[in-house]
Image (cartoon, coloured by chain):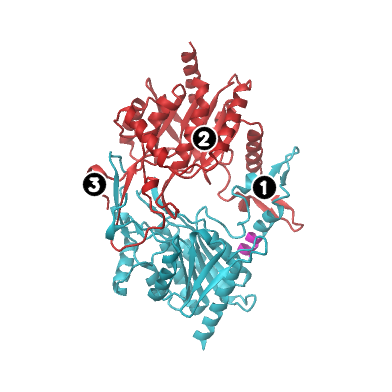
Chain colours: A red, B cyan
Amino acid sequence: MFASGSHSLCFGMDAVDDADKLPETAINEVTSFFESAPPLTDAAETEICLKEFVDRNTSLSGINGKANRVVCVTSGGTTVPLEKQCVRYIDNFASGHRGAASTEYFLKAGYSVIFLYRRGGCQPFCSLLPDDPLLECFTVADDSIIEMDPLHAETVKKAITETRAAVADGILLKLPFTTIFEYLQILQLISASLRGLGPSAIFYLAAAVSDFYVPWESMALHKIQSASGPLDMRLAQVPKMLSVLRNEWAPMAFYISFKLETDKDILLAKADMALKKYKMHMVIANELSTRKEEVIVVTEQEKVTVRRDSTQAGAEVECPLVELVVDRHSAYIKKVDA
Amino acid sequence: MFASGSHSLCFGMDAVDDADKLPETAINEVTSFFESAPPLTDAAETEICLKEFVDRNTSLSGINGKANRVVCVTSGGTTVPLEKQCVRYIDNFASGHRGAASTEYFLKAGYSVIFLYRRGGCQPFCSLLPDDPLLECFTVADDSIIEMDPLHAETVKKAITETRAAVADGILLKLPFTTIFEYLQILQLISASLRGLGPSAIFYLAAAVSDFYVPWESMALHKIQSASGPLDMRLAQVPKMLSVLRNEWAPMAFYISFKLETDKDILLAKADMALKKYKMHMVIANELSTRKEEVIVVTEQEKVTVRRDSTQAGAEVECPLVELVVDRHSAYIKKVDA
């Protein structure tokens, strides 16, 4: 049912594919994307939050000697509204588990984390909870005291205490998004706040960002009406924001992007391409069916397969993955500082 | 950015628009839709659950003299996968609040409810909870006892006790869906189980069902690859399932469908059209911006505006709406039985 050839269907997991344009063109496209985007609600408050968060965390001594280190973890899929008064939208499948779990390990490693997440998506410290924890983990006794199901007690306690502690300690800042417009605008604000940290900042871009969108200006105001017959629609490409982020917004930061494919043959080739074209420091290659078991970390020097520790119940692949990232980031800081 | 004319973009809130076909064509289309759909997981278990639920509830004496009355409430939006190993999909905005709240009032009115809901969407008795109730309603004290935030205590207790009670009493059956394929297949199973109840069954179709989809057979197996330039795609129309449900699957039931529009001028005309074309007993007309304050109930005889009681904190429009539905349903049963 798809048009074939040069116009085939495509929503990539990030906005990095197939750009073969001069940086200037990219900057112009980005400028016009932002100019035509609906204004971000609470932009001023978000800027203040970010400034306070970064100021506080860069003045901390840090645990494990990780003072000043801040990672921006993006998580979950962006939506593309099809109408201004949005009824229908295109979405990317992404539970947000990768970003939420990685956030936990970065916090443990002594990093401060800006968690840019899809509203309603997975939250750090909550990955082991059932889908509907309130209804599934609690019961109300006859004396109308709420009791926890013993099966879930430890998980629930851990989720609540660790989340509250991280937010109270000021080492975790959670910022939600829904649309591609919100995501890219908040990412720009984050990059402005992290630019001053130079090589101490990481962008860990695990979110599934749409490649195509309907420009706000040309979007229908009202719900678009039916007609009989098949539906044809045309979407514009999202500008190659990763290129501008990497080269202009925060050029000294350490960059990690993700590639998700269902076809293994394509995966490594695309990861290599993203590494070179966008000057990423690491590209994490995921195959959809095995992504919870293993990932391949692609850098200029090496391809490392990282597997979860299958001998340990509940062990996650994000644990060794973040360890490797922290190791390479430390080496990067040393190299830049030298 | 959309192709104009006869092929304009459209994802309706139900599969009822613009069909002007003979019933036979509709039946053929439905048959071929089901034949090409991916098989429903747990179809046999769902059938058994439904049979047990309906048998148990039709043998109950009922409260308020509502013995035998079962309502199927559908809730939330369906997704349209764009690939078999699904990474991208089209979604309809629908929190599922209307269906979840209506379920509560139907239960209070003595009905048994089959709640066909979008996985992850709003749940009955939970509408007053914050977005992330576990993290927002509880704290862990120093002695590692979990305590409830007093602000939310009553709401949380009510949510847990009433949900558990309804499920334990066997008057609430919750069935989740995600895709358009799952939704329509489960709806068919439900209609088969309710057919024997004749006029005592209600279909209260509040879910936002996609009008267009990619037929499973013609769907790409792997993630579709990028190409430069704009994206063109073509989707097929979902067959007019409502017509077959109404006329073939459970022809004696009482039918309520919903129309959501952002443009008020179009709304009532479309509600009228749905009423006549699909022989609905009631069509609930919602305008996107005011849908939580008021709805217009359209029947053959009347147009009634139903408003929430704004003098009472927390009063919902679903309360008087379900009252009106129950009243009209009682009249319908009397008329059919006479």
Report in which chain the residue with disc 2 lies. A
Q: Which of these two is toward me, A316 or B32?
A: B32
Q: Mark 3 points at which residue?
A: A4
Location of residue A79 in the rendering, given as x and y in whole percent from the top left corner: 43, 46
Q: For residue A16, which quarter of the picture?
A: top left
Residue B273: quadrant of the picture: bottom left
Horizontal side, residue A127 vs residue A139: left or right: left
Disc 1/disc 2 C-alpha distance (Å): 28 Å
Amino acid at dot 1: Cys
* Residue at 52% across, 45% down: A119
Q: Tell me the amino acid under the disc marked 3.
A: Ser
In the image, is B62 to the left or to the right of B75?
right
Specify the label residue A202 is tagged with: none
Could you classify mark 3 by the number of other residues whose Cα lies within 10 Å: few (under 14), some (14-19), or many (20 or more)?
Answer: few
In front of the other: B19 or B83: B19
Give the secondary structure at mark 2.
loop
What residue would you read off at disc 1? Answer: B137
What numbered label is drawn on residue A316?
A: 2
Magenta region: B162-168
Residue at 73 percent across and 56 percent down: it is: A141
Q: Mark 1 lies on which chain?
A: B
Same chain under badges 2 and 3? The reply is: yes
- Please indicate whether residue B229 sits to the left or right of residue B42 in the image: left
Main SS category, magenta section:
helix
